[in-house]
């Protein structure tokens, strides 16, 4: 089955699409010119931004009134497909709503999913998605078998986003079918735990702390160093699970994927789950007291030492520079 | 108060401390030998035990799927306090994709009788497809809340804080439902000596996929095939130095060459 029609599960707000959406649209249009976006929400307000990245059409469900995107989007997609508007491939972001939707849709359509992918290649009738496994040391490529639509989800920053100055996408309003009790979950309130300064997954420099900090108040050193470098503070899963910092700080397989110019890991040993989220950084500096720590295998500059001594001196030196 | 019956889906995985490997003939993840309870599932078991206690009655059961009849990981969950388990064990399951896994686990849940709540982890530590919980919900026709970081039940309704990219959402969902919980949702208990001894006597029913009426499974039921397995380009290690009290200067110099300060 050749790939002539691709949908992208698209997200955004206030007329702006997420960088994740732009990345997936850019990849999609490199595979076929026939790219549509699907928005679980108000797609009309995103039509212009989606068009700029190559979406010709945007399917829009309109406001979901507090219902989760997963059930609503999957059932609306299923209805479109049953009505004959059948894509060959649907690309999803590997995030909360993307995961819920791809999972629900796979059951509704009875097709497999390939998730956590970092690349997709179409070779005539064969569609192959690649996933890094074992902490990214091995690339596992799997081909879809059977009829489509093929469903694949991708990690953030798998593709570079590029505009193509396309016209605004044509808005197609879609109705969400009644999904009965499967849609019974309702969002009552939204809480934003914003950090000040640059966003973790967009920052040019990231300073991340781990268990080696010893205790929660020592995270202040990570924050101070971040401020001096105009960096975003990040964290390993260990200290997020321990409740030192909110989940929004977490870098890794189950957190954010970051690819900054400089990544400073303080007191992070480099568990596989963490490395997956930061190995793509251009330059890595690691400070750890254990010289056998796996983080040193990927560090451009590794300091074997006590971060409680190194960080204060580094902070003082940067302050002295003004 | 209403009694809560909960089924927790657990995965038994090779010890993550030992490096994973692929079966050279099939390129499937190797899952032979001793398997342990996936760490991420201990949170779900603990959450279930706490919800049953809070409800004032009910039972926690577990379901698992493994090609080789292994139960040592399930015994850990039983030692924590789960009452019984269903293991779907069938050599034919090897190579199953996430959709088949979800169908098998959903059938195992139904075999125990539909509970008030199904709990799973957000993703397994070894396979991390991350879609199975939501797929189980769809197969069972249940509403679901994924990535729950706080769960309680109030008047037969789930009140959940669900993790989001920017923070969290307060969510409400009627029972029966499926919830996937994040690591850190609760602090899992260590099984007591008595718990470990009791667990040896608890019942684990072993069934096959055929017993549950799910087919096809394994490689033949998977909508995917292995295309290639290659080594990723390794990142080169750079300079590693011991701190002599002046190592911070190396960092400053490095940041200067990168022109970020």
Image: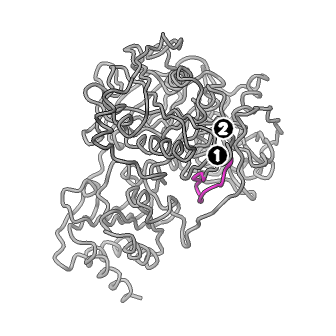
Is A125 colored magenta in this rendering?
Answer: no
The residue lying at 28 percent from left, 56 percent from top is A295
Q: Main secondary structure of the magenta part?
A: strand
Which mark sits nearer the N-terminus, 2 or 1? 1
Label 2: element kind? loop
Q: Quadrant of residue B5?
A: top right
Span colored in magenta? B161-172
Label 1 Cα crowd, 10 Å radius (few <14 / some 14-19 / many 20+):
many
Q: Quadrant of residue A308?
A: bottom left
Reading the image, the residue beneath label 2 is B175
Q: Which mark is residue A217?
A: none
Q: Are marks 2 and 1 on the same chain?
A: yes
Figure check: B13 above or below A217: above
Whole-percent x and y of residue A223? 44, 74
Left or right placement of residue A258 versus residue A307 in this view = right
Reading the image, the residue beneath label 1 is B158
Q: Nearer the viewer, residue A167 or B158?
A: B158
Q: Nearer the viewer, residue B122 or A76?
A: B122
Mark 2 and mark 1: span between their CA atoms?
A: 7 Å
Mark 2 belongs to which subunit? B
The residue lying at 59 percent from left, 49 percent from top is B152
Q: Is residue A220 visible?
A: yes
Locate the N terminus of chain B by quadrant. Answer: top right
The residue lying at 36 percent from left, 74 percent from top is A218
Q: Nearer the viewer, residue A243 or A60?
A: A243
Locate the C terminus of chain B by quadrant. Answer: bottom left
Label 2 Cα crowd, 10 Å radius (few <14 / some 14-19 / many 20+):
many
Left or right placement of residue B62 versus residue A218 in this view = right
Figure check: A217 above or below A153: below
Q: Are marks 2 and 1 in contact (CB under 8 Å)?
A: yes
Mark 1 belongs to which subunit? B
Left or right placement of residue A91 versus residue A174 in this view = left
């Amino acid at each position: 089955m050749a790939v002539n029609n691709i949908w992208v599960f698209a997200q955004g707000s206030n007329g702006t699409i997420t960088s994740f959406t732009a990345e997936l649209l850019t990849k999609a249009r490199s595979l076929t010119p026939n790219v549509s976006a699907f928005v679980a929400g108000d797609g009309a307000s995103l039509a212009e931004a989606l068009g700029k990245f190559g979406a010709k059409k945007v399917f829009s469900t309109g406001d979901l009134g507090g219902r989760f995107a997963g059930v609503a989007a999957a059932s609306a997609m299923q209805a479109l497909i049953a009505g004959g508007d059948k894509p060959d491939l649907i690309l999803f972001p590997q995030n909360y709503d993307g995961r819920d939707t791809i999972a629900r849709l796979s059951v509704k359509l009875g097709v497999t999913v390939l998730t956590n992918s970092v690349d997709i290649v179409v070779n005539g009738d064969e569609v192959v998605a690649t996933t890094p496994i074992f902490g990214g040391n091995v690339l596992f490529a799997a081909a879809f078998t059977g009829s489509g639509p093929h469903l694949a989800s991708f990690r953030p920053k798998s593709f570079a986003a590029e505009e193509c100055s396309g016209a605004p996408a044509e808005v197609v309003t879609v109705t969400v079918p009644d999904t009965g009790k499967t849609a019974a979950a309702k969002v009552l309130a939204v809480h934003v735990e914003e950090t000040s300064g640059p966003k973790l997954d967009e920052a040019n420099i990231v300073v991340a702390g781990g268990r080696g900090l010893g205790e929660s108040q020592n995270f202040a050193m990570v924050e101070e160093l971040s401020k001096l470098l105009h960096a975003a503070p990040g964290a390993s899963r260990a200290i997020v699970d321990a409740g030192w910092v909110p989940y929004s700080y977490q870098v890794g397989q189950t957190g954010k994927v970051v690819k900054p110019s400089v990544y400073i890991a303080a007191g992070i040993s480099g568990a596989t789950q963490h490395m997956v989220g930061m190995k793509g950084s251009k330059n890595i500096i690691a400070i750890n007291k254990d010289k056998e720590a796996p983080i040193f295998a990927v560090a451009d500059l590794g300091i074997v030492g006590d971060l409680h001594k190194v960080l204060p001196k580094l902070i003082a030196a940067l302050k002295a520079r003004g | 108060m209403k009694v809560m019956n909960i089924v927790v889906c657990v995965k038994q995985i090779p010890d993550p401390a030992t490096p994973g490997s692929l079966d050279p003939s099939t390129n499937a993840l190797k899952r032979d030998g001793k398997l342990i309870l996936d760490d991420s599932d201990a949170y779900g078991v603990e959450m279930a035990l706490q919800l049953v206690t809070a409800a004032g009655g009910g039972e926690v059961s577990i379901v698992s799927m493994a090609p080789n009849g292994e139960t040592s990981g399930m015994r850990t969950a039983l030692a924590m306090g789960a009452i019984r388990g269903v293991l779907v064990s069938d050599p034919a399951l090897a190579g199953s994709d996430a959709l088949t896994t979800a169908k098998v686990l959903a059938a195992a849940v139904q075999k125990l009788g539909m509970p008030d709540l199904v709990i799973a982890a957000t993703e397994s530590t070894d396979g991390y497809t991350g879609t199975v919980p939501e797929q189980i919900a769809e197969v069972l026709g249940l509403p679901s809340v994924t990535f729950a970081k706080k769960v309680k039940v109030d008047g037969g309704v789930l009140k959940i804080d669900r993790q989001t990219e920017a923070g969290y959402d307060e969510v409400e969902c009627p029972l029966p439902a499926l919830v996937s919980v994040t690591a850190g949702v609760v602090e899992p208990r260590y099984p007591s000596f008595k718990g470990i001894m009791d667990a040896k006597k608890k019942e684990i029913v072993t069934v096959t996929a055929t017993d549950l009426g799910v087919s096809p499974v394994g490689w033949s039921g998977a909508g995917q095939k292995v295309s290639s397995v290659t080594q990723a380009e390794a990142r080169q290690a750079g300079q590693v130095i011991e701190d002599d009290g002046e190592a911070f200067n190396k960092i400053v110099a490095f940041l200067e060459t990168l022109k970020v300060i």
